[in-house]
Each structure stands twice: as C-alpha cells, then as structure tokens.
Image (cartoon, grey):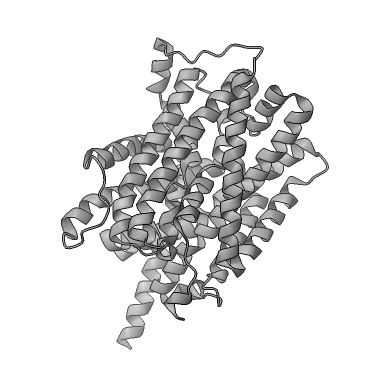
Amino acid sequence: MNSSNVQKIGFATAISLVIANMIGTGVFTSLGFQVMNIESGFAIIMLWVVGGILSLCGALTYGEIGSAFPDSGGEYNYLSKLYHPSVGFLSGWVSVTVGFAAPVAAAATALGLYVNKIYPGVDPVMLAITIIVILTSIHSINLKLGSAIQRAFTLIKIVIIVMFVGFGLFHKPGHTTSFAPTSDSWNQITSAAFAVSLVFVTYAYSGWNAAAYISGEIKEPQKSLPKALVWGTLIVMIIYTALNFIFMYSVPVPELKRQVEVGYLSANKIFGHDLGQFMSLVIALLLVSTVSAMILAGPRVMQAMGKGMRQLSIFSKTNRNNVPYIAIIFQSVISIVLVLTSSFESLITYVGFTLNLFTFLTVCGVFILRKKYKHIQPEYKTPLYPVTPILFLFISGWILFFIFKNKTEESLYGLGTVLLGFIFYWLSEKFNNKKENV
C-alpha cells in the first residue's frame, strides 16, 4: 500500500483520544468507594491532585520515550527495546487480555447502570453489549470515520462537564462539606486507605498514555505525541479536581458511600429530579466516548504484537483502510465476556495493579534510554529530568506496595495473568527455536 494513501491521525484526534480515554468510568463512579475510608473533603481533593501529578509526570516521561521510538504499540514497543522482547510481550499480553478489554467492559457497564437508573426497564447488561458491538463495527471499518466520531464525542464531553461544574458552583446545598485542611485530613492522606484509594484514582486517570498506542498512525509523532500526552493529561487533571469538588459539594458524604452512579446523585441535587434525570442520561452518553477511545487504541497493541510474533500474526491483519479489524473484534469479545461475568470493584483493583506495574517499568526505562541509546536524540526531552520520573516512580511504587498489602487477592490475580503471559512467551520461543533447528 502506498504510504501516501494510508490514513493518518492528526494532533486534534490524538489529544481527544487521550482526554476521552481518561474521562470515563473512573471519575463518575469511583468517589463512592473512596469515601468509604476517607471522609475529609481536603483529603479527597488531594487524592485527585496527587493522581494528576502522577499522571502528568508519567506523560512527560512517556513523551521522551515515545519521541525516541515513534511506532505504535505503547509499552509493548517501548519495553521490548528498553529491556527485552519478553518484557515487552508481557506488557502487551496484559494490554491484550485485560488492559483495554476490562476498562471497556467497566465503562460500558457503568453506562448501562446510569441508563437503568433513569429507565428501569432497560437491561444494563444488554445495553452495554450493544454499545460495544456498535462501536466495534464502526472502528473495524474505517479509521477516518472512527476518528471523526471520537473528536465529536470528546468535544461534547468537555462542554457538558464544564457546564455541569458551572451549574454546580451556583448550587446551594442543604449540607456543609469542609475542604479546609485539618490534622485529621493529613492523617488520612498518609494512611493505607489513601494509597488504596489511589488505585481508583489512577484507574480514572489511566489513558494518559493512550496516544502512545497509535503513535505510528499519528502525523509527525515525534512532535505531536508528547504534546498530546501532556496537554491531554493537564486538561483532565483540572476537570477531575473540579468535578470531584462539585460531587462532594452537592451530595452529603454518607449518601455517596458505595454508590457507583455518583454523577446521577449529584445531577439530581443540582438540577432537581426531572432535569437531573436528563443530565444523568447525558453523563451516560459521555461514557460512549470512553468506550470508543479504548476500542480504537487497544487493538493497536495486538497489531504490533502480531507483527513481532508468528503465533499472533492474525492480529496484524488489516483491511483496505489499514484498520486491524481482527484485533478490534477480539478485544471486544473479551470485553463482552467481562461485562457478563465480572464485578465492578474487583475488576478495577485487578486492572489497576497490573497496569501500574508496567507503567512503572516504562517510566523507569527513560534512564535506560539515556544510557543505552545515546545515539538517539529525541525531539522532546523530559522536563526537570530526573526529578519527574523519580517522583512518578516513588508515588507509583508506594501505590503498588499498598495495593499488594491490602488487596492481596486481586494483586495475585494480576501477577497470575503476567505469569500466564510468560509461560505463553516461553513456549512460543521454545517452539520457534525447535523449528529453526529442524
């Protein structure tokens, strides 16, 4: 195929992909789990600020690595070159099996639950599956059409959220929530509960690296990729902090506990029952953008793995529009299975631990990049190096330690997934070596 005829993604689509991947299930559903053990308004806001700083440090570091290795595949591409192909394969394995499929399932499930709250006759599971099937069909056919839909939904999402925050600030709640720091709020910030709650926050922020998965399809990736990662993350950090302030400002903390449909509760308080129902439906529709973004980005990891491994070559197949349709369909099938079988809370913890593990390794790889690949001079360099990656590694390592300590079962499931990937890689390499020696 002539390279001039291959469809390419512009900066606007790349940044919308980052924003859409990030603003989704987590920010509209996770607060109810955070306030189970942290009731201080100041501590909750600090949760989202720390999560934003963590993601921003990650995005700034990924920008340099992505500029040095501007091919699609994200961590699979980076870790294969920085460490060893086996490490890259394991990160790709996690992305293929749960990294994108599980968040697609969670976002689609949340969408179904929101709509079911308003229209109890709607089956949330069937609606979730229908949304996945429709978006899979669109993204499997044409990259240009999928990109246009992605940009439109992301723009609508930002406008609606800004309106929601604006109206929320003028709302006069019937309760009082203090956001001032106290000695108790500082104790909560240094507690194990804060670290475990950061799992939900980092899950909500996950997607800040989304553009890295399709960098090979971005115009001028050495320049556009770092800008998309950093600006997308910064915009979302501001939106998330403002949204969670409004949620806690408008709804009493006891009413938020263990509630998934936080946006629904807040909308009813701010707008009243009838208009609140409409706004809740709008929030549900915003999740379409999240599902769409992950269906667009995730299969590019499978495509990259298919090019590198003979056993997975089926995932590298593309249609006449250069879209990896088999990889897209495969990921969506896994998502549908997860919609039918998994619980929301355990799914987030399991995915959060596993994904944090590989973003930790990737950010650590910037030190290897500067030492091992001195001949490569990326157009973009990590600002405040080495403070930026070290800060990311410190916070991320702290989160991983406390997740494993307090959510051992879900963490072991995550490590078990990695182990299964290693066994598959080892058997594949053994088979290839045996074939070459025959």
Residue 125 vs residue 239, the one in the foreground: 239
Q: Which residue: 47% across, 31% down?
A: 197
Q: For this view, does 344 lie left or right of residue 41? A: right
Q: Residue 295's spot in the image, x, y percent?
A: 56, 58
Q: Residue 104's spot in the image, x, y percent?
A: 58, 51
Q: Is residue 409 visible?
A: no
Q: Residue 418's spot in the image, x, y percent?
A: 42, 55
Q: Which residue: 59% across, 61% down?
A: 146
Q: Residue 285's spot in the image, x, y percent?
A: 67, 45
Q: For this view, does 236 lie left or right of residue 119? A: left
Residue 260 vs residue 400, the one in the foreground: 260
Q: Is residue 428 visible?
A: yes
Q: Which residue: 49% across, 29% down?
A: 241
In the displayed orientation, state which residue is furthest to the right. Answer: 121
Residue 376 vs residue 54, the one in the foreground: 376
**Screen quadrant of the C terminus:** bottom left
Q: Which residue: 38% across, 77% down?
A: 431
**Rendered position, 323 above or below 414:** below
Q: How many marks?
A: 0
**Rendered position, 433 above or below 239:** below
Please tell me in which quadrant of the rendered image residue 194 appears.
top left
